[in-house]
Amino acid sequence: MSMEQTWRWYGPNDPVSLWDIRQAGATGIVTALHEIAIGEVWDADKLRERKRMIEWDDSKKPAKSTGLEWTVIESIPVHDDIKLGRPGRDVYIEKYKESLRNVGEAGIKTVCYNFMPVVDWTRTDLEYELEDGARALAFDVSEFAAFEVFILKRPGAEKEYSEQQLKKVRKRFDKMSDQEKKILQKNIISGLPGAQEGYTLEKFQAKLDEYKGIDSDKYRQNLAYFLREIIPVAEESGVKMAIHPDDPPKPLFGLPRIVSTEDDLKYILKIVDSVSNGLTLCTGSLAVRADNDLVGIIERLGAKINFAHLRSTQRDKDGSFHEAGHLRGDVDMYNVIVAILKEQKRRQAVYRPDFSIPMRADHGHTILDDLEKKTNPGYSAIGLLRGMAELRGLEMGIEKSGVVFR
């Protein structure tokens, strides 16, 4: 009844190799064809080629199985024309449908995606130093405000902060060196792992301007239009979609963020009532909001959880946060895993073939030898290995205790 243990791999250029991942004990690979431009069709031959690379060692004669399987795609990006509801969206939706058909034919069962406008997951610091010398990802509210008010100079940004907040932000900005300002800008808009776009300040502001007149209601309508078109194709192709929560789960840059709360998730899952219209349970993203009841979300929406990112975040009083250890921070990981295992038990009872939910340890700390290496922020080998080992041990302890069967 264990969850399927997966690992995010950024392709052939990832510093973490497939053999590293296999030695870490994962069996599922989470990856994407990052080289394909947003909006273009994921070609069937390219999918099969990448799947072969993951699952077979062709250097052996005869070829030998690697013991890995490409089980989750993260992500097939959604084109801005779809998000903005532009006249050209139907063209890109048809391409998305074709990609899903090809994914299904390749035997890949799950697609994680997001509907965040302009920026994907956002952090102000990619090397936040913890007390033990490890480095983590962090989001500092004052630094973010300093960027949008004093570096980007987004029109109207200062109106979203109180006079007291702006004084604090100004003080923080004045203490920053030119190098610190450049790093902050790069962290926010120059692209993070998995992102396919980086921006200059001018291009970034132009992107924000495209969303003028798009409020939360309109943005929900655009998501609903997209889902009503693609979910039937996903069903036919044997593919389960899994929308990722906003990260962080709150408005940024004055843009609508519509996947931040349980109510948001309920709305999305009701648009098309299908197991193919599901969610990615990202415990770290959702836990940034104290009003998100993670265990309750699993109990109430568990049938639609198609993928899980297990990580923990530590909130500060002002809304800032950093990535905590996987068994620390604000996430009650014990009860989260108990709830997930109970959901899997319910699925087994009704003979659902997808009872085992794929999960991956997410956003590990940079520790030990990786502190001296070039790694993808949040995805160094040793930190994720530690996180997976902790989660694996906790899951086994829960299963052995029998608490799930009571």
Image (cartoon, rainbow, N blue to C red):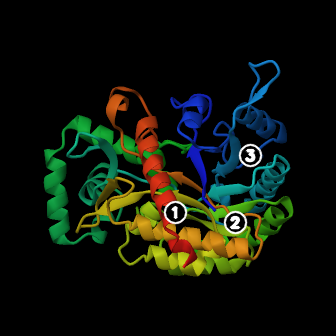
Q: Which mark is residue 400?
A: 1
Q: Residue at x 57, y 75 (%)?
A: 405
* Labelled pair 1, 2 in contact (Cβ < 8 Å): no
Q: Quadrant of residue 230?
A: bottom right
Q: Earlier in the sequence, mark 3 or mark 1?
A: 3
Residue 214 visible, this angle: no
Q: Residues within 10 Å of mark 2 (few under 14, many from 20)?
A: many
- Name the residue type under label 3: Glu
Which of the numbered marks, if any, corresponds to residue 355?
2
Residue 37 x %, y %: 67, 42
Q: Are marks 3 and 2 in contact (CB under 8 Å)?
A: no
**Residue 40, which numbered label?**
3
| In the rendered image, the vertical position of residue 46 relative to residue 158, given as above or below | above
Q: Secondary structure at mark 1?
A: helix
Q: Identify the disc placed on residue 68.
A: none
- Within-10-Å neighbours for mark 1: few <14, some 14–19, many 20+: few
Q: Quadrant of the C terminus?
A: bottom right
Which quadrant holds residue 13?
top right
Q: Taking 377 as reference, is 114 left or right?
A: right
Query: Taking 108 as reference, is 356 above or below it?
Result: below
247 is higher (above) or lower (below) than 74: below
- The spot of residue 19 in percent (x, y) is 59, 30
Q: Nearer the viewer, mark 3 or mark 2?
A: 2
Q: For marks 3 and 1, give the one nearer the viewer.
A: 1
Which of the two labelled residues, at mark 3 and mark 2, occupies the earlier sequence position?
A: 3
Mark 1, mark 2: which one is toward the viewer?
1
Say which amino acid is labelled 2: Phe
